[in-house]
């Protein structure tokens, strides 16, 4: 339960009812569920759009009140009072007409106003090319709190360059009830789970597929949609076009090691862990990752995660690490994410940030 008075929270997010084509719903579901578990009351406001309407896999989450609105006029007509009276109003990235929504929230809300950026490197790139799809630079100083999926130096950029009064990390998280070790026969020496992207394919080739080509007796697997027909898979590499989320835990548990590859914009920003990183660790599957700044603040290199810069390094891990050491590494990473990176940790972080601001405001007044 919460320390202090429970919070009345309103969240305007891209979606909580549909995980179709977006990673926001899973993030919001975990965060809101754990905020509710801590005694807070959450109203989630979601724009009713056709592509989510036809793909709602959780139309009525039991841990919050969810309301759909048809337009900005509908939003204002029905929810001005809840927004005005809330202790915390949070606007998420990629909310339709997010700039106008943000302006209205900042004019209306009497409590703490926060922007939750699940896409921080993308957002900053958009702002720099004057693409104000869901956030305008003039709004950033108006939000009391900027919650960012990216930590590290990006937080200084948000405060010093864009004028945020308080930028704080709120990383992605995982659900320990969905991701955990389970007895599975090892099907592959190394696996990778991820949708195709132009910027991730070269490191995937360099770190994993070249390793597969150099070790014909090894067993490899790549799972994810949108890979072009032109991709030349090694003979010992299985390709799975679609792997539904319900099968991700089993997939990780069938691998001796799992490969982590990071999007280029996340590498450039640093301090941008992906949910796949935490989910794999939660399953106790040792991770072989590319390098990016800040990764060592999440996992200890060599004992909780392995860093590879070449196919040769990848192969040395696959071939030379004893089984007992492999298992110990997976367990250490699992304990680390259980201690720091569950959705419950994120809910507590939000609560602490809000209390910090409330205390600051009360001192000022």
Image (spheres, helix red, strand yellow):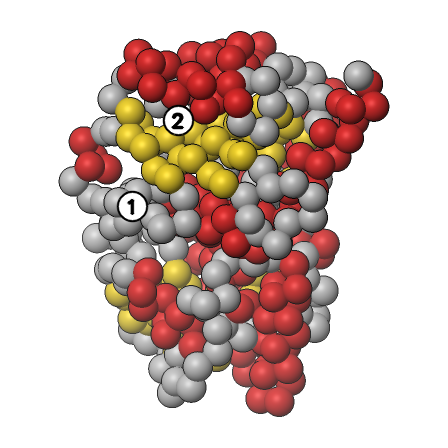
In the foreground, 299 or 16: 16
Instruction: Establish if 132 lies above or below 245.
Output: above
Q: In this view, does 55 lie to the left or right of 28?
A: left
Residue 354, image x and y in percent? 67, 35
In the foreground, 38 or 132: 38
Q: Check whether the beta carbons of the residues at disc 2 and disc 1 lie within 8 A of each other.
A: no
Instruction: Establish if 293 lies above or below 194.
Output: above
Instruction: Establish if 72 lies above or below 201.
Output: above
Q: Can residue 198 be seen in this view?
A: no
Q: How crowded is mark 2: few (under 14 residues within 10 Å), some or many (20 or more)?
A: some
Element class at badge 1 = loop
Element class at badge 2 = loop
In the foreground, 3 or 12: 3
Q: Is residue 42 left or right of residue 306?
A: left
Residue at image x 52%, y 54%?
37
Q: How crowded is mark 1: few (under 14 residues within 10 Å), some or many (20 or more)?
A: few
Residue at image x 40%, y 70%?
249
Residue carrying label 2: 95
The disc, 2 or 1, on the residue closer to the chain's N-terminal end is: 1
Instruction: Find residue 188 and report its image quarter.
Output: bottom left
Residue at image x 55%, y 83%?
319
Picture disc at residue 60: 1
Q: In this view, does 260 lie to the left or right of 55?
A: right
Of all residues, the one furthest to the front in this rendering is: 5
Residue at image x 49%, y 41%?
41
């Amino acid at each position: 339960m919460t320390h202090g008075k429970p919070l009345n929270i309103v969240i305007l997010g891209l979606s909580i009812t549909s995980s179709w084509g977006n990673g926001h719903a899973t993030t919001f579901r975990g965060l809101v569920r754990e905020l509710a578990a801590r005694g807070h009351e959450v109203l989630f406001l979601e724009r009713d759009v056709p592509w989510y309407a036809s793909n709602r896999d959780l139309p009525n989450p039991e841990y919050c009140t969810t309301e759909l609105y048809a337009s900005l006029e509908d939003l204002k007509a029905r929810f001005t009072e809840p927004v005005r009276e809330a202790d915390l109003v949070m606007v998420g990235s990629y909310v339709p007409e997010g700039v106008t929504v943000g302006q209205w929230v900042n004019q209306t809300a009497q409590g703490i106003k926060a922007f939750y950026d699940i896409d921080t490197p993308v957002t900053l790139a958009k702002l720099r090319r004057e693409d104000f799809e869901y956030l305008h630079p003039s709004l950033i100083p108006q939000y009391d709190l900027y919650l960012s999926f990216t930590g590290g130096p990006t937080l200084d950029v948000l405060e010093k360059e864009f004028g945020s009064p308080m930028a704080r990390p709120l990383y992605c998280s995982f659900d320990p009830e969905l991701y955990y070790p389970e007895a599975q026969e090892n099907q592959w020496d190394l696996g990778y789970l991820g949708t195709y992207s132009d910027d991730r394919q070269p490191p995937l080739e360099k770190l994993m597929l070249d390793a597969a080509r150099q070790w014909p007796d090894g067993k490899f697997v790549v799972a994810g949609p949108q890979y072009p027909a032109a991709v030349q898979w090694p003979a010992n590499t299985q390709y799975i076009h679609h792997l539904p989320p319900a099968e991700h835990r089993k997939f990780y548990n069938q691998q001796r090691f799992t490969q982590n590859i990071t999007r280029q914009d996340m590498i450039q920003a640093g301090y941008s862990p992906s949910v796949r990183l935490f989910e794999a660790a939660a399953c106790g599957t040792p991770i072989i990752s590319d390098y990016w700044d800040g990764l060592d603040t999440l996992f200890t290199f060599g004992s909780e995660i392995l860093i590879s810069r070449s196919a040769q390094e990848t192969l040395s891990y696959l071939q030379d690490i004893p089984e007992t050491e492999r298992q110990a590494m997976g367990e250490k990473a699992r304990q680390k994410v259980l201690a720091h990176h569950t959705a419950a940790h994120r809910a507590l972080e939000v609560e602490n940030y809000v209390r910090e601001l409330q205390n600051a405001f009360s001192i000022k007044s």
